[in-house]
Amino acid sequence: MPPNPRSDVAATRDCLVSHVNSSCSRRKGPGRPSQGIRSGYIRVEVYLPPDVREGLDRLVSRRAHQTGQSTHRADVIREALVMYLRHAENQEK
């Protein structure tokens, strides 16, 4: 007697459902920080002229190519701002 095709379908479905459920439970990327973390920070807006923005885009694309990881403008700006403030703090001492 040939195997019951319905049992194969049910087994395949169960396998797929378990795979989807296990892959959905993986931790997602950092994304937006939780409200508790955000309460310790302040929002800063930066307006850049077009030539600076183009240079920033080139830097972001070069960094993404070198590291092989996704890099965003905000990450580079945040890093530059932290470096600037640390440098300014050291100059005052």
Image: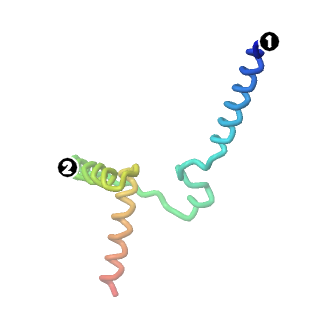
Nearer to me, 24 or 49: 24
Coordinates of residue 20 in the picture (x, y in percent): 65, 35
**Disc ID at residue 46:** none
Q: Is residue 40 toward the left or the right of residue 91 in the image? A: right
Q: CA distance from mark 1 to mark 2?
A: 74 Å
Q: Quadrant of residue 80?
A: bottom left
Kind of residue sitting beneath label 1: Met
Q: Earlier in the sequence, mark 1 or mark 2?
A: 1
Above or below 92: residue 43: above
Q: Which residue is mark 2?
A: 51
Q: Quadrant of residue 34?
A: bottom right
Q: Is residue 18 toward the left or the right of residue 70 in the image? A: right
Q: Residue at x 40, y 51 (%)?
A: 69
Question: Quadrant of the image for the N terminus?
Answer: top right
Q: Residue at x 67, y 30 (%)?
A: 16
Q: Which residue is mark 1?
A: 1
Callout 1 crowding tier (Cα within 10 Å): few <14, some 14–19, many ≥20: few
Q: Is residue 52 toward the left or the right of residue 66 in the image? A: left
Q: Residue at x 32, y 76 (%)?
A: 87
